[in-house]
Image: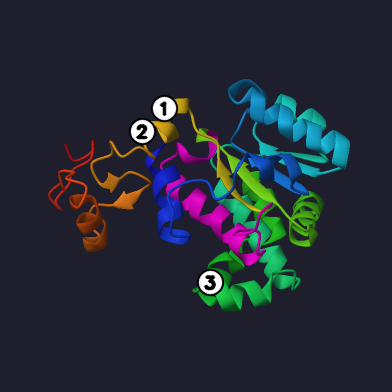
Amino acid sequence: MSRSDGLWPLYTVGFGAASIGVEALEETDCYLITGSNTTEAHPVIATKIKQNVKDNDAELLVFDPRKIQMAEYADQFSRVEPGYDNTWINGLIRYIIDNDLHDEEFIEERTTGFEQVAETVEKFTPEFVEEKAGIPPEELKHAAETIANADSCVFCWTLGLVEHSHGTENIYAIANLALITGHIGEPKSGVSPFRGQNNVQGGGGDMGPLPNNFPGYQPVTDPENRKKFAEYSIYVFSKNVLRTPPL
């Protein structure tokens, strides 16, 4: 898991991992896949997605610089200029807000900062998105309306979205897209960063070897977490933990 992949959910939705399980990938009504060559890197997940598209008419949107194999099963494939993911994602957000397709009840009850997001995306007009990211306005419109009108949607990506100098901004943008449409925190809706290898989540994250987390992504800086794990005679780290970059 990249640093961007792990930190954005923690800072936006409070938990540094995917918000849905495999069942949602088998049953959701809509997928947005970007920065992921899913059939090659995650063939089992790709098979489940393709089966849902085939059997249940789930809608599949693929945004990528390359026409990957998943694009062959997509309702819409949009070729993106490399390095402009933040542009087209914010363009989707702007279109959804401007056309009153956002989930006002969800936003009011379960989010903060909506006005700031709306102001930030104001410049990402369909024309600007087409100029920078190469996405035609009609494709931007179709994707935005598909996501906003779906009963459920899963947002999927891998390192193609995060391994940029602005990777964190890309992930904040896709988090905002999920939040303004209310597609998070539901059984068949949420965010799903596909891991680069099996040890990243199962061994490198969930089980606690990261110096800043106890098992289950529980921060060592939280006094309640420190107290809880001390009761099990687990050595409690210093609060001044260091990860690889500063070391």
Q: Secondary structure at mark 1?
A: helix
Question: What residue does disc 3 label?
Answer: 111
For the point 87% across and 42% down, the residue is: 57
Q: Tell me, yes or no, whether the highlighted magenta stretch contains residue 170.
A: yes
Three-letter residue code for mark 3: Thr
Q: Secondary structure at mark 2?
A: loop
Where in the figure is residue 63, as x and y percent of width and height?
A: 68, 40
Mark yes or no: residue 158 visible.
yes
Q: Are marks 1 and 2 in contact (CB under 8 Å)?
A: yes
Q: Earlier in the sequence, mark 1 or mark 3?
A: 3
Which quadrant is the C terminus positioned in?
top left
Q: Earlier in the sequence, mark 2 or mark 3?
A: 3
- State the mark number for residue 115: none
Question: What residue does disc 2 label?
Answer: 204
Three-letter residue code for mark 1: Asn
Give the residues drawn in magenta, as a range: 160-188
Question: What residue does disc 1 label?
Answer: 199
Where in the figure is residue 12, as x and y percent of width and height?
A: 46, 60
Q: Earlier in the sequence, mark 1 or mark 2?
A: 1
For the point 25% across and 46% down, the residue is: 212
17 to the left or right of 140 = left
Local packing at callout 1 (Cα closer than 10 Å; few below 14, some 14-19, many 20+) is: few
Q: CA distance from mark 2 to mark 3?
A: 30 Å
